[in-house]
Image (tube, rainbow, N blue to C red):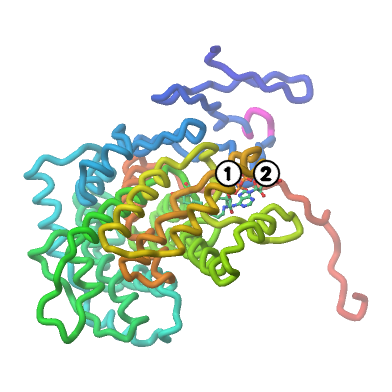
Amino acid sequence: MSDKAILEINGEKHEFPIMKGTENEVAIDIKTLRGTTKGVITLDSGYKNTGSCKSAITFLDGEKGILRYRGYTIEELAEKADFLEVAYLLIFGDLPNKEELDKFHSDIKKHSVVDDDVKKIIDAFPKSAHPMGVLSSLTSALTAFNPESVNVDSEEDMYNAIVRLMGKLPILVAWSMRKKKGLPLHYGDSSLGYVENLLKMMFKQPNEEVYEQNPILVDALDKLLILHADHEQNCSTSTVRITGSSHAGLFVSIAAGISALWGPLHGGANQAVLEMLEAIKEDGGDTKKYMAKAKDKSDPFRLMGFGHRVYKNFDPRAKIIKVAADEVLGDLGVEDPILDIAKGLEKEALEDQYFVDRKLYPNVDFYSGIIYRAMGIPTEMFTVMFALGRLPGWIAQWREMRLNKEPIGRPRQLYIGENERSFKSIEKR
Ligand code: SDX
């Protein structure tokens, strides 16, 4: 393949370098386009064909259903690593040795408290507040209590902001759930592992002396967090990167990512999947009705948990979560008709020509909610769990963007509005 791309505009030829990625992906570097063509730009609504950056963090191949974090396959990491190891891998580039992992965890534990005034902010929310709105607000508010986390140019300052956020976000996740449930906001126990501590903060009842850890839940949640940890330049990660590119602090950049993830077309889909499955159950399990709605162009309904901007094959995470859902429900002795409806819907969709033609497969959100539900996590909290899983990926991407000294993100546009026109007084309008 040539190392140059040639674009001919109005009879003039313009050459642009062709770049190759580690896995032989090809990109045309158009950074000189507007200058050499006196103003011509490309247009790619939704950026399906446009790379925003070079990144060494996550590789995915949507056609082959491949997902790797820093070269390690998601299948191996989900089976052999724990979430904190994967967080370290994503953020710093390689799997930590025992000393590095212990130091990372110990530094995180040092910051696993938040200013007590944060409770006053939570108290100000109505119980009806969606926990994603609470989480995004509180994550942004953390800046006020950690001003040293804003201007982080050195790797050391960045590290300190990172371990602060890794320590504090699980508290905000747990407290956003307990606020909804009307439970007191308390801490976990820094002698516990990262996921055990989260579960204790989420589920310990005020009248319980000791919170009994269930190893099935610990393992299931650890695996779910790993599977959600990063996914290259998705909507929320691109939001984190472009927010951070203005040199806004880490906490507010992550708060922006949490807000983007909330949308039902993105991370909010895991909540929407459960609500869809519940509706089908209420409808007597009439999956055919919902399949028809999903295919009806006049109906805005989409089969939540199906389809993907990039995967045109099975989402490898969905395969792992589907097996885990069976295991967790079996281990917990939970018979959930919702899981049976999900499997029936999946089978129908995989055999339906509309879905086959459009390469619509179950994605990460299709089965995850079933496990969260079996764990006793309220449906409105599902996307909050996604956000906690994605935290190390967002941090890794933000850190890479800042260490690479990338310029402030500022896309162009094709203007299709009015030509110049003169002001009209109100009497003449
Ligand atoms: C996540 O980007 C990431 O990496 C995201 C994520 C991550 O880890 O960060 O993987 C997490 O967000 C997973 C996606 C969760 N969202 C959902 O499950 C919501 C339901 N899915 C759809 O809304 C949709 O599939 C999207 C938003 C995910 C993708 O939308 P696209 O890119 O517009 O889909 P497409 O271009 O592939 O659509 C092709 C066709 C269209 O129909 P036609 O115009 O060709 O007739 O498929 C149709 C679409 O209307 N289609 C669906 C559908 N998804 C696409 N039809 C019914 N149900 C669906 N779910």
209 vs 382, left or right, is left
Say what secondary structure mark 2 lies in. Answer: helix
Q: Is residue 398 visible?
A: no
Pointer 1 residue Cβ closer than 8 Å to ligand 1: yes
Please name the residue shown 51% across and 56% down the image.
266
117 vs 207, left or right, is right
Outermost residue, right side: 428
| Front residue of this view, candidates 320 and 36 | 320
Q: Quadrant of the C terminus?
A: bottom right
Pointer 2 residue Cβ closer than 8 Å to ligand 1: yes
Q: For the residue marked with disc 2, what is the amino acid? A: Tyr
Residue 259 in percent (x, y) is at 46, 64
| Front residue of this view, candidates 308 and 407 | 308
223 vs 34, left or right, is left
Tell me how many marks there are.
2
Magenta stretch in the rendered image: 34-38
Q: Which residue is mark 2?
A: 354
